[in-house]
Image: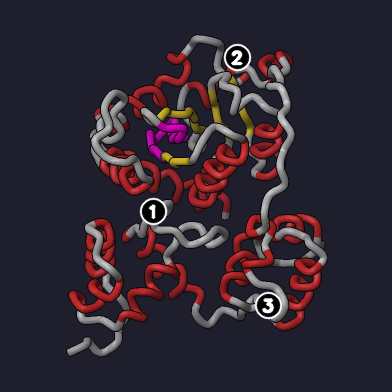
Amino acid sequence: MLMKYQTLSSYERVEIEVLLKEGYTQSEIARKLRRNQSTISREVHRSYRRQDVHFDLNLFPYDASYADRVAVENKRLRGVKTKATKARVKKIENYLMKDWSPQQITMGVKNIGVSTVTIYSWIYQGRFENFTENDLYFGRRPRKVKYMPKARPDKSLFVTHSIDNRPALVNSRQQFGHWEADGVEVINSKKIIYTFVERKTRLFAAVLVPDKTFSSVKLAVDTFMSQYEDSVKSITTDRGSEFTSYAFIRLLKHEYNVKIWYSHAYSPQERGTNENRNGRLRRYVPKRKVQRKVTQNIVSYGVRRMNNAPMGVLGWKSPQHQFEKARKAMLKAKK
């Protein structure tokens, strides 16, 4: 007999995460938890990390702790006046019909009052009469790009954005919100894992993407920022080609208002925290032999284990604990 409807508990969300990873279908999970299948389906879709991209649990697996935060936020917002007024929805739809992207609408229309992610979610929810997800630009066949020789990075970038100019507060790890980034290769594959580590709390994040192209780098940055944007002030990288383009700098500087610093050539010790975390990630994504296909699921599993393990440098607290503590303090100070 099915349970009388009530909100899913944290324990049930953990069960959903575990069962999904074990390959159970949503209907099988519903039977195990004695819930309606629609309840499980709504929960999984509502807690999907990237509402602005197509639903794919292999790319962004269900995460019980994240789902808990979504549930708390949704409960807080109950009774709050909706932003999806008829006038606003119609106004946004008019711009979409003019081939404006959600980001162009958010940034280019005065007093629009909603975020890019919100517009994407409205599209997927079917709120617009004449515009659906099939009309989005990335749903169309991309134009072929003619081969262009690789451009060498402008050396002035390494002067303007040199790690030598990075403030002392960042170097000493006294200030929260400064990250290091790198790319980790997947053996026998074009895939790359882009990793990010917060210098003060050692919180680690990693996103698996298809290759080193700018579109993949942008996907990694957008995915990372969708979760941590309020806690990112700067990013320090090496001089890899994917990080030294003007497009990458524009992405960080203009879209996210994030500063970028470059370490010196052949100086991995200047990003020692990132190198250390990458080495530990190799426990889950080996460098030499891979017995199974590397997926975001596997990467996320390793990241969670690393973030929840205590570290001596943090007084034997976990990076996750210290990050949440620092994030709350920062948000409280902004009020």
**Considering depth in this image, is 326 or 215 the residue closer to the camera?**
215
Task: Tell me, yes or no, if residue 34 can be seen here.
Answer: yes
> Which numbered dot is residue 128?
3
Magenta residue check for 192: yes
Q: Report, in whole angstroms, how far the alpha carbon at label 2 lies from the one at label 1.
A: 40 Å
Relative to 242, 16 lies left or right: left
Instruction: Say which amino acid is labelled 3.
Output: Phe
Image height of 38 relative to 279, above or below? below
Please give the count of numbered marks on the rendered protein: 3
Image height of 176 relative to 87, above or below? above
Instruction: Say which amino acid is labelled 2.
Output: Asp
What secondary structure is marked by label 3? loop
Q: Residues within 10 Å of mark 2 (few under 14, many from 20)?
A: some
Could you tell me residue 10's position as x and y percent?
27, 67
> Which numbered dot is residue 301?
none
Task: Tell me, yes or no, if residue 195 can be seen here.
Answer: no
Relative to 212, 152 lies left or right: right
Which sits earlier in the primary sequence, circle 2 or circle 1?
A: 1
Residue indicated by mark 1 = 58
Could you tell me residue 70's position as x and y percent?
43, 65
Q: Which residue is drawn at 47% across and 16% down?
A: 270
Asked which colour scheme the image uses, the reply is secondary structure
Magenta span: 189-205
> Which numbered dot is residue 164?
2
Q: Residues within 10 Å of mark 3 (few under 14, many from 20)?
A: some
